Structure formats: structure tokens, C-alpha cells
Image (cartoon, rainbow, N blue to C red):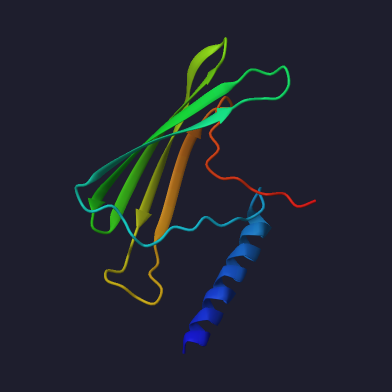
Amino acid sequence: MAMMRLSCVFFLNSFLAIAASLFAQEKPYFVTYDHHLEDSGDLELGFSSTIGIPRSEQRAYLAPYSEFEYGLTKWWTSELYLEGQSTSGDGAVFTGWRLENRFRPMSGRHAITPVLYLEYENINEASRIEKEFVAKHR
């Protein structure tokens, strides 16, 4: 039974990756979240930064972002990200925002607990936030 579940998960992931590559502008990639959401009424604050120190004649920069995660219900969590960027000698600029929503349609624990993810972003070209890093093989 466990092998059958594992096979179904592998087949579903493979199918989604192939389907996404047919219609997407970018190559498919996966970001994994667990099924835990913020408790209803709880607010979580997070602050992080990307720091760029170039080796050549380019200027160093700091790109901070703030995260506000709120549990709207026991099955719905929403997150707002506010981003900025400051380059040495140039000043600072607001670069945009992102809104993430995660929905858990089934209550309780299951062998597979699906979480639906929806994200909207309004980011300009000055953004230098690096949340994910992708290794390129040569």
C-alpha cells in the first residue's frame, strides 16, 4: 500500500512537471512547504536581507524584505512581503510586494495532506531579493 502511494506521488509530480514545461515561460522547479499553517489569529513577523558585495567596480547593495504572516482561519494563512533595495552611493528604493496564500482543504492528518498555494507579486526591476538559489551544473 505504501509503495502504491509512493508511485502515485511520483507519477503526479512527473505529470505536473511535464505539463508545466509545456506551457511555462520558465523551466519548472519545485518549492516544498509542509502542511503546517499559522494558527488562526496569530501574526508572525520575519525580516531578512540579501547582501551583495561585488568583486569588481560595481557597488555593494543591501536588499531587505519584511514578511507578515497571518493565520486568517485554521485552514488559510496569508503572507505579505515588502521589499526594498539600497545601493551604496545611490540611496534606497521600494522595489515591490508579494502576497502569498496557502489553503489546506482537508482538516486533520492524512498520508498526503494537500496545501493549495497562490502567489501574486508586484516587483519592479530594481529588486535584488534572492530567496531561492539554483545550482547550475557544468
Instruction: Look at the picture and state if 83 lies above or below 116.
Output: above
* Drawn side of residue 22 relative to residue 88, left or right: right
* Drawn side of residue 71 relative to residue 52, left or right: left
Q: Nearer the viewer, residue 68 or 120?
A: 68
Q: Nearer the viewer, residue 116 or 57?
A: 57
Q: Residue at x 52, y 41 (%)?
A: 131
Q: Quadrant of residue 80?
A: top left
Q: Position of residue 133 (x, y in %)?
A: 60, 45
Q: Position of residue 82 (x, y in %)?
A: 41, 31
Instruction: Look at the picture and state if 52 lies above or below 23.
Output: above
Q: Residue at x 57, y 69 (%)?
A: 13
Q: Position of residue 113 (x, y in %)?
A: 38, 70
Q: Residue at x 67, y 53 (%)?
A: 27
Q: Quadrant of residue 120?
A: top left
* Drawn side of residue 125 relative to residue 76, left or right: right
Q: Nearer the viewer, residue 55 or 21?
A: 55
Q: Residue furthest left?
A: 41
Q: Residue at x 29, y 54 (%)?
A: 76
